[in-house]
Amino acid sequence: MSEYHPHDVEAKWRALWAERRTNEPDLDQARRPFYNLMMFPYPSAEGLHVGNLFAFTGADVYGRFKRLQGWQVFEPIGFDAFGIHSENFALKMGLHPAELIPRNIANFTRQLTGMGGMFAWEHVLSTTDPDYYKWTQWLFLQLFKRGLAYKKKGAVNWCPTDKTVLSNEQVIAGACERCGSLVEQRVLEQWYFRITDYAERLLDNLGDATKMDWSATTVQAQRNWIGRSDGAIVRFALPEHANERIAVFTTRVDTLFGATFLVLAPEHPLVETLTAPAERAAVDAYRRTVAAQDVVTRKVGDKEKTGVFLGTHAINPASGQAMPIWIADYVLMEYGTGAIMAVPAHDERDFAFATRYALPVVRALAEPGDDANTPVAAAFAGDGQCRYVNSNGLLDTLAPDAARERVVAFLEQRETRPGELVERKVQFRLYDWCISRQRYWGPPIPIIYCDRCGPVAVPEDQLPVLLPPLDDIRPDDSGVSPLARDPAWYHVACPECGADARRETDVSDTFLDSAWYYLRYPSTDVADRAFSADRTRRWLPVTSYIGGNEHAVLHLLYSRFITMVLHDAGMVDFEEPFRRFRAHGLIIKDGAKMSKSKGNVVNPDEYIARWGADTLRTYLMFLGPYQEGGDFRDSGISGPRRFLDRVWALVEEAQDPDCRDGEIRQDVLIKWHQTKMKVTAEIEELRYNTAIAALMELVNTLREQSCSEPTVVGELVQMVAPFAPHFAEECWERLGHGTSVFDSPWPTFDPALTLSDDVTIVVQVNGKVRGQVTVARSAGEADVQALARADDTVARHLAAGTVRKVVYVPGRLISFVVN
RNA sequence: GCCCAAGUGGCGGAAUGGUAUACGCGGCGGACUCAAAAUCCGCUUCCCGCAAGGGAUUAAGAGUUCGAGUCUCUUCUUGGGCACCA
């Protein structure tokens, strides 16, 4: 007999896997390719924490399961090592990121190897490697060439701590998502990607089951982010300015009869023209106040609404009433047309504004019991209970959808040319993606500015534009990147005319690095292009992608956009990069989220040292549903370790010659087939905790016997293998197999053998369980009822009245209704 | 404010509308041991009862059903997303 020593076993199999290239599929020949992707880590100085390990283990379990099912699984790993996070940490430590990052990557590599991931290390990548970011720059140029990358001066989110701009996606409630500083508004010239051109497709594909099978929560988050609104643009005539009209976007054109005033964003271009001389001073003062505000005070809701009157009016084309025109900072220039029609009776914000400035409130809708003139106490949106009022009979009896159509038609009739008064319009909340960063640690944007030629792409054969080795990489408040301090680097000849020119000194957003890394993995050994056409055709789109839902809108949306662009360019033949995506849950510790500030971050190293990686993996997968996460408790880990020890003992026992060739007991046979059925189904659905529970039950059943069948124990080992890979290899070898357990076929089951001959039938009287009877599965209702009535307790409860009804569910229960 | 999840023993968590509390942790008792650890065996939702048995119980309340943790409605709590988006 020998004992289970995890560290010996794990070291042995790590070495053998590397030596035998067990985890390196043949990328050019695989017949059943399965691309098993997990979100690559940012290599922090702290190393992997137990939450990362939970995420990677769950994805690895799935990959190993698929491999056992006969797929050639490619499970790559890499490092998302560019970006502000790495740079800030390096600055804090007084180190250069170019020095720090390789160190962190070495530590991560040690930990990822130690956890027993089935990683194809021959295809590891780091976004900071010039062989990688060369192609990130190439990707930028593909967008640039197609007019999808453009430079624009505009108000941007500026983080005063990180001293760089942030994309809208990186601003959470007016604060920097990374450091939490309140974001300021700055006017800068930045590079943008036209992701808004793809809004409709990005939204439509979310509902296309042939292209995407994603976690519902992630799909919902993307839908909300893209934010499609179906509405109309209405143009209001201005009696005092016959040449101008004010266009507003509204989703509630049916409330036009209740629109009593217009509000423009203070930055709206027509404000200058429309302001009456008498109001000039007040308007200018208000616009200055707003311009001085930062994004936070401007955008964070629930504050007192302010505004000023422009001294002029528009005409409501439906009611004919004059509508005063105001400017107010609750109207945003970036959304819609930068102007709204205010319907105070049916919009909370408009109601608050109208109340404050004593503007008229007119109903377009009335609730039951109200009439057209009942004063409005609070704005209400209206629903099926409401009816239209004040519409001169136009809408009275209509449902909201029909009313919208009717108003549009009404306005269209009065137009002298199409679009003069109204136009149907779909509006998105999504903004273009700002990718410029005024930082050091990223891929330089491959553009050269020439006075004569304008912005010119760096020729592709001159890529990569290497990041120059600067000593002082600290960002400053100037709004330009530290790269602008290296004239020797940025002074270059214009690639087109040869005149003196200047490189773009901003670097690109880290999210661009990660928006295409899955395309690079299969082609890391390809030097002359970003990705090989053959490899890409064989392996992509990604078969299964697993990652955190914190990237539901950032990384996942950008990746989809980039893939669509490449698809349209004819470079890939799919629009959606990730066939199946599942978000994993989060690990909490003692009921609280793990965070450095709370000091409850669990380092997996010490648990691996004490219990072994296989035990930690099994524990992490057992502690809760993978897609929901769970609570990490030190005491809980001993259970999975006991489980592995017991499997080990069963393997030892199965090797005993006296134990072979026994006849399998009926109840063991049933449990065995039930377990195979259940484990197969549960792993497929990522319900690892219940799969492990089923395996524990099988072990408990096997332990009741003096001897266990080697066949059953062998299949038990195969089913444990995805969770405890080194352990399973060792057991498999001990059972006499000469090849990897991961090259063995996943156990099959016979559904007929999952059912026992006898069944327990529950007996209920008036809905309460009063007994149970065991009968042959083939027994009929009459037999079951007779047996049930014969039970003393049941009989007593039946005697309390008359049986009115009997419900019989074969194989399950018999229920008597008595009164 | 709006949208989406979730709420089950001391704890992590199981339950195609059909025996709620599987599996694991912890706890209690026992075996082994000089002793402890490890291991093994048994018990463990709560209340009444020696027991047989009875009652209560899936955040709270109502409803549908022979039967509800599961379906419907209302309320509360927690977590997540969106948020002057017209």
Image: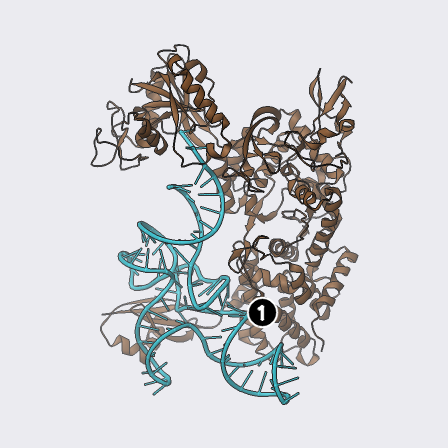
Chain colours: A brown, B cyan
Q: Is residue B47 above or below residue A250?
A: below
Q: In this view, does A387 lie to the left or right of A299?
A: left
Quadrant of the frame with the C terminus of chain A:
bottom left
| Image quadrant in which you'd find residue A781 | bottom left
Residue A788 position, x and y percent, is: 34, 76
Q: Dot 1 lies on which element?
A: helix
Q: Determine which residue is flagged by label 1.
A: A639
Residue A333 visible in the picture: no
- Under mark 1, the amino acid is Gly
Q: Which of A643 and A357 is in front in this view?
A: A357
Q: Which of A479 and A516 is in front in this view?
A: A479
Badge 1: how crowded within 10 Å, few (<14), some, or many (20+)? some
Residue A721 visible in the picture: yes
Q: Is residue A272 above or below residue A383?
A: above
| Image quadrant in which you'd find residue A5 | bottom right
Q: Which residue is drawn at 58% across and 65% down?
A: A634
Q: Is residue A415 above or below residue A666?
A: above
Q: Which of A55 and A661 is in front in this view?
A: A55
| Image quadrant in which you'd find residue A697 | bottom right
Q: Which of A374 and A113 is in front in this view?
A: A374
Residue A705 position, x and y percent, is: 58, 79
Q: Is residue A366 above or below residue A612?
A: above
Q: In this view, does A234 lie to the left or right of A75?
A: left
Residue A720 position, x and y percent, is: 63, 64
Q: In this view, does A156 lie to the left or right of A539?
A: left
Residue A17 position, x and y percent, is: 75, 58
Quadrant of the frame with the N terminus of chain A:
bottom right
User: Tag 1, which chain?
Assistant: A
